[in-house]
């Protein structure tokens, strides 16, 4: 169901059929979960960088605060985006913060996907 395929910036990466292409999930202290081939085929670097931004949030907040402040809020935002097509999950404040942290961590890469991973609202 979940296949460990390597590490990204020291974080375990798992691929699974349960996650759609261009999506991911970060569970600090466990790893980042992406769609099949996203990491092993090198297709989803922007998603990996975004999810790594959540690792950076976790490093700032610690485990309990991360899940209470980031995890719950992000999950509710993702659910909301399923019901309201006009709602863009990546514009939620915790997602933008993850993007901003990753953008800075990776030295503001010129090829950053600002449309799908905005660094400001």
Image (spheres, grey):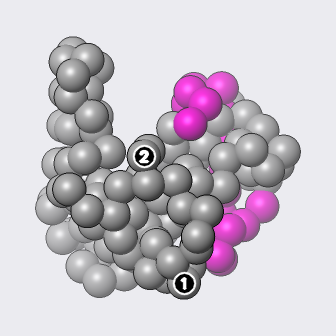
First along the sequence among labels 2 and 1: 1
| Mark 1 crowdedness (10 Å alpha carbons): few <14, some 14-19, many ≥20 | few
Expressed as whole percent of the image width and height from the top left, the position of residue 45 reads 66, 55
Q: Which mark is residue 115?
A: 2
In the picture provided, is 90 more to the left or to the right than 112?
A: left
Residue named by callout 1: 107
Q: Decide whether residue 31 is among the magenta residues.
A: no
Mark 2 is surrounded, within 10 Å at the Cα level, by few (under 14), some (14 to 19) or many (20 or more) other residues, namely few
Where residue 39 appears, as percent x and y from the top left, is: 74, 50
> Toward the viewer: 97 or 6?
97
Q: Secondary structure at mark 2?
A: loop
> In the picture shown, does residue 47 fall above or below 18?
below
What residue appears at the point 30 percent right and 55 percent down from the top-left corner? 95
Q: In screen coordinates, is 81 left or right of 108?
A: left
On the question of residue 23 being in view, the answer is yes
Answer whether residue 54 is visible to the viewer in this image: no
Q: Position of residue 92 (x, y in %)?
A: 21, 48
Residue at (56, 27) in percent of width and height: 20
Toward the front, the furthest residue is 110
Q: Name the quadrant of the C terminus.
A: bottom left
Please tell me which residue lies in front, 6 or 22. 22
On screen, residue 69 versus residue 88, left or right, reads left
Q: Which residues are magenta?
A: 6-22
Report, in whole angstroms, how far the alpha carbon at label 2 lies from the one at label 1: 18 Å
Residue at 79%, 50% (x, y): give it.
42
Position in image of residue 97 (x %, y %): 28, 66
47 or 114: which is nearer to us? Answer: 114
Q: Residue at x 64, y 35 (%)?
A: 35
Q: Could you say whether the residue bearing mark 1 is in a helix, strand or loop?
A: loop
Q: In the figure, residue 69 lies in which quadrant?
A: bottom left
């Amino acid at each position: 169901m979940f296949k460990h395929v390597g590490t990204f910036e020291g974080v375990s990466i798992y691929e699974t059929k349960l996650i759609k292409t261009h999506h991911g999930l970060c569970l600090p202290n466990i790893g980042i979960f992406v769609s099949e081939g996203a990491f092993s085929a090198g297709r989803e670097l922007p998603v990996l960088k975004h999810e790594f931004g959540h690792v950076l949030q976790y490093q700032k907040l610690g485990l309990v605060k991360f899940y209470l402040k980031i995890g719950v809020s992000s999950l509710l935002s993702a659910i909301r985006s399923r019901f309201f097509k006009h709602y863009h999950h990546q514009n939620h404040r915790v997602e933008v913060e993850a993007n901003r942290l990753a953008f800075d961590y990776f030295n503001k890469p010129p090829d950053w996907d600002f449309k799908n991973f905005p660094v400001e609202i």
